[in-house]
Image (cartoon, rainbow, N blue to C red):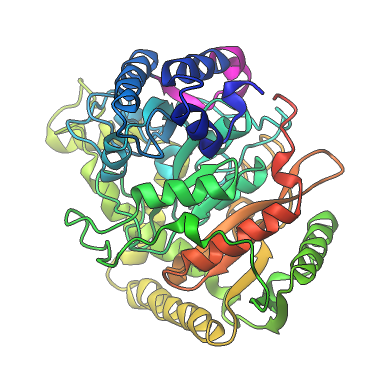
Amino acid sequence: MELYELTLHELHELLKKREVSSVDATKALLSRIDAVEDRVKSFITVTPEEALKNAEEADKRIASGEMDLLTGIPVALKDIFLTKGIRTTCASKILSNFIPPYDATATARLKERGMVLLGKLNQDEFAMGSSTETSWFGKTRNPWNLDCIPGGSSGGSAAAIAAQQATATLGTDTGGSIRQPACHCGCVGLKPTYGRVSRYGVIAFASSLDQVGPITRDVTDSAIMLGAVAGYDPQDSTSVNIPVPDYRKALTGDVKGLRIGLPREYFIEGLDPEVKKAMDESIATFRSLGAEFVEMSLPHTDYAIAVYYLVATAEASSNLARYDGVRFGHRNQDARGLLDMYMVSRDEGFGAEVKRRIMLGTYALSSGYYDAYYLKAQKARTLIMQDFIKAFESVDVILTPVTPTPAFRIGEKANDPLQMYLSDIFTIPVNLAGTCGISVPAGISSDGLPIGLQLIGKHFGEETLLRAAHAFEQATEWHKRKASIA
Ligand code: GLN
């Protein structure tokens, strides 16, 4: 096994026993990045000097005996997390020269634990998309098939794990952006409950939906990464002040008697037959482990996409108003007067998808339309949330596909926003409800592309979610399969 192939927990054991140093591991990852980055393009910025400096510090810390699970582990972050002194672009031209003066809380928490920062990962511009095709810095490719999208918006985070360019990564999930790319790249992706992880210093897309979470090689790593970043932060008023459990302790392997719901609305026509087959096999695996299945309904599922594209775009139009060329980011130098400067800078700085969202959101919020669109969407959102709360009175977790099909080809949906939006049908309701969800490898299509299984948990039900995902993973071999580029 090469050092770059190891899971976080495997590498941790080697570091702890001093069989390898963090500098060794970091060098292995950096040369791996060099070897495959031309083909995959997971990164916007690679930070080799920072990484080696962090690794040397980590080795000192290990030598002195004060070691955390994250100490010396090479990590890469979606380029939405502010990193002090390191360019953070959100994959947009408008922030292409932005160097943050401070760290996001998630960045800072990983640093305190001694992570090694390898660099900043590609994504859709402002996290708007499902394919990492809207980045101003170019497209990321799926390491399982370079003609396919890696998913999005955290496509770089998932591709880097699949191509073995980082030991663990962080992404963000507003409507599926952790779970969907994790699914398409054969990784584990966890969207925690809204309020579980601080978003301070994470560039805002839709503030009532955005959540931070890990993309990793296996469920144990997911539990470790969540534990490292979760918890109350006075800097984010939406973070919830409840204790962070030891998520690793939840991984008991025991799902006997676990009640798993199968929502009728998620097993629909149009589901790819190979995805359907993988779900059937997964259900059989859980049954053999002693779990029980319950058919159930989430009756307002049909409204989720429409609600999401009103709420998310309304919030985005407001969040993105700050990019005006005045304090930071791209500014047009030839504009005549202030208003012209705002307009030309924004016109030049934002890509087509971001502009589409700003226009949709501004429209939905405008007087005369607010009640018909935004307010109505908020009411429907409450109904969707109540569906989940009610469902969790009788089941412990809910099992669904992550996406209706495996990864599509680059360009296939790029000119058809509605088709792109519809591909998020199974992930979006979880964000609207604010609960947690995890994507776990559950099959490979006949074309050699990964298929993922989604487990949805109740609010702050991450321990049950991780326990179920871990038991499934241990009973199957899917997480051990490697992308063809690997
Ligand atoms: N694909 C969805 C969108 O385009 C979700 C993105 C996300 O979760 N950041 O908005």
Q: Residue at x 67, y 29 (%)?
A: 143
Residue 42 lies within the magenta run:
yes
Is 445 left, or right, of 320 in this rendering? Answer: right
| Above or below: residue 355 compared with residue 139 | below
Residue drawn where x is 17% and y is 53% of the image: 235
The residue closer to the viewer here, 198 or 466, is 466
Quadrant in the picture for the N terminus:
top right
Report whether residue 404 is seen.
yes
Query: What span is in magenta?
Result: 34-46
The percent coordinates of residue 171 (x first, y second) are: 45, 43
Q: Is residue 320 above or below residue 249?
A: above
On screen, residue 321 above or below 401? above
Q: Residue at x 32, y 32 (%)?
A: 114
Position of 295 with respect to 35 (left or right) is right
Lateral position of residue 146 relative to residue 319, left or right: right
Residue 206 locus on image (x, y percent):
36, 56
Residue drawn at x 59%, y 40% is 217
